Amino acid sequence: MKNILVPTDLSIRSLSYLHSLAEQHNEELNITLMHALKLPDSILDFWVFSRSPKHYALVSNEFREACEVMKNKYSGVINTLQVEFFYGTTTPALRNFLKAHEIHEIALPEGLRYQCPCNDSYNPDRLIKKCKLPVKHLKMTVQKQVITAATSISELLVEQH
């Protein structure tokens, strides 16, 4: 069983890359959808910092349902599909995160327009490229016009080449 990390901006459109990932593997996968968040700049903010429920509120019900749809659609390949928050902006912090989650490989969506759902969110691509894990690039398997506007779960089920 392989543990794979996929960065996400917590949008349904970002899950469309899972089609490609599931089709590239024959073995069972544990997929961790990672959303990156910056730590507070102020020492006072950092002092009272906790893994705030406001960050967990970024994961919408629609996104949770879309994750279930993808997990059910590829039940033969996807063993687990979970969302985890990465707090930090440094390569060593990301390496610790990857080690703690026992990640074997990173799947990086090509051409994903990362849209930050909050001020603390950021695109972790530059950190991922510095990690010493194998990086597999995922291509979109559905039409681009569908994905740019993908906001519904039903659009995830439509796979067009």
Image (cartoon, helix red, strand yellow):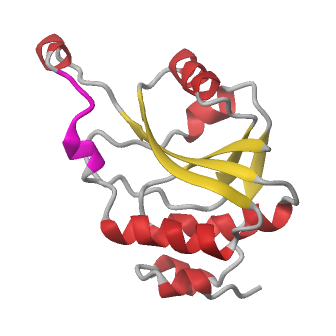
Q: Position of residue 6 (x, y in %)?
A: 61, 49
Q: Is residue 101 magenta?
A: no
Classify residue 88 as left or right of residue 39: right
In which quarter of the view is residue 49 placed? top left
Is residue 65 depicted above or below 92 in this figure?
below
Q: Position of residue 120 (x, y in %)?
A: 29, 39
Q: Quadrant of the N terminus?
A: top right
Q: Quadrant of the C terminus?
A: bottom right
Q: Position of residue 24 (x, y in %)?
A: 84, 62
Residue, x 51% and y 65% (percent of image)? 67
Using the rendered image of the protein, determine whether residue 13 is visible from the camera's viewpoint: no
Using the rendered image of the protein, determine whether residue 9 is visible from the camera's viewpoint: yes
Magenta span covers which residues?
49-56
Residue 46 or residue 26, whichever sits in front: 26
In which quarter of the view is residue 53 placed? top left
Residue, x 66% and y 81% (percent of image)? 142
Outermost residue, right side: 26
Classify residue 95 as left or right of residue 160: left
